[in-house]
Amino acid sequence: MFVLIAAVVVLAVLGVTFLLSYSKSKNVYDDYLETVDKKEYGFKDFMPIGFYLNEKLNLQKLLPAQLNRHLHKYKSHVRAQIIELHGAKYADYYLMIHNGNKTAISLVVATGAALLSVITGSQGDADAGGVFLAASIAALAGVPFLIDKGLAEKIDKRRLTLQMDFPDFINKLTLLVNAGMTISRAMDKIATDDKKGTPLYTELKYALGEIRSGKSEAVAYEEFGRRCKVKEIVKFVSVIVMNLRKGGAEVVPVLKLQSAECWEMRKNVAKRLGEEAATKILMPLMIMFVGILIIVATPAVMSFSMGM
């Protein structure tokens, strides 16, 4: 009975919060959601609720100072991940989207679990009601952390894409520079000819746009390397910046050497991806093997049972 009462109270609080936030946020944040892709953010329709709650509630100030410091450090880490994924220029916007998304999802999941707790509890299943009630409370704190964890996976995927694209890029650059083009013109041609739109070329186009806007080439390339955060690209940028600042005709041999190193790096990455794919395939194969064993063994077991 206690579980059912607690579940009703939790559902009432969450339900009122959900409905009130929905009514207050309706049509208020439409401008922020125009560029949000629903394929990437499945809970896009509920995001205004998250935006509203994040604006109106500031529970962090109620926490103890020690816990507050840890939370602030954690938020700074999340912001750094957003900056790596979307750039410093749009970090505030995408951080708002990310926070609104995780708040909305946690509220929806918690409300759904509380509803299931009330349903199962009212049917006399106190154990299941207690599990759903605990899941509802845990969802409010746990779901945001799980969504934050997804940022690390996106960053790993982005860095992997950068590593896979970079050898081809540096090979093209070496050929063009060796043919007599300046580094900046060669980069501009590669960026213009690109049809992929992958992170490497997106970041390159952004750097070239900054140069055209008046930023120093050396500074723009250094920021390009910092945004990519891949050691091979950082090393490449240091070579380019040194050539820009000190001059010298040795840039082509260095680029050729780095091109060879990057192709080796790409082979290692491809090998690692193949090993990961083989590991992922192992579980379905095991399930299929167990299924085959069951199919083969069942007639034998049944005939043995009938013989008994």
Image (cartoon, grey):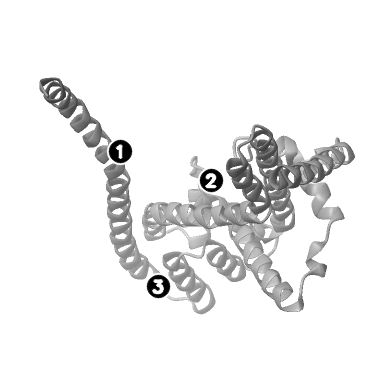
SS at badge 3: loop
Mark closer to the chain start, 1 or 2: 2
Crowdedness of circle 1 by 10 Å Cα count: few (<14), some, many (20+)? Answer: few
Q: Which amino acid does label 3 sit on?
A: Ala
User: Which numbered disc, 3 or 2, marks the residue closer to the eye?
Assistant: 2
Residue 188 in percent (x, y) is at 53, 53
- Asked if disc 1 and disc 2 are in contact, CB closer than 8 Å, the reply is no
Q: Which residue lies furthest to the right in this view?
A: 24
> Which image quarter is the C terminus in?
top left
Residue 289 in percent (x, y) is at 21, 36
SS at badge 1: helix
Q: Name the residue under label 3.
A: 249
Using the numbered discs, state the Cα–Cα distance from disc 3 to disc 2 in whole angstroms: 25 Å
User: Which numbered disc, 1 or 2, marks the residue closer to the eye?
Assistant: 1
Residue at 44% x, 71% y is 235
The image shows a total of numbered marks equal to 3
Of 40 and 100, the residue lying toward us: 100
Q: Name the residue under label 2.
A: 192
> Which image quarter is the N terminus in?
top right
Numbered label attached to residue 284: 1
User: Which numbered disc, 3 or 1, marks the residue closer to the eye?
Assistant: 1
Q: Classify 65 as above or below 62.
A: below
- Asked if disc 3 and disc 1 are in contact, CB closer than 8 Å, the reply is no
Of 157 and 117, the residue lying toward us: 117
Q: What residue type is labelled 2?
A: Thr
Residue at 62% x, 44% y is 132
Of 256 and 185, the residue lying toward us: 256
Using the numbered discs, state the Cα–Cα distance from disc 3 to disc 1 in whole angstroms: 55 Å
Is residue 32 visible in this depiction of the protein? Answer: no
Numbered label attached to residue 169: none
Is residue 255 visible in this depiction of the protein? Answer: yes
Q: In which quarter of the image is residue 89?
A: bottom right
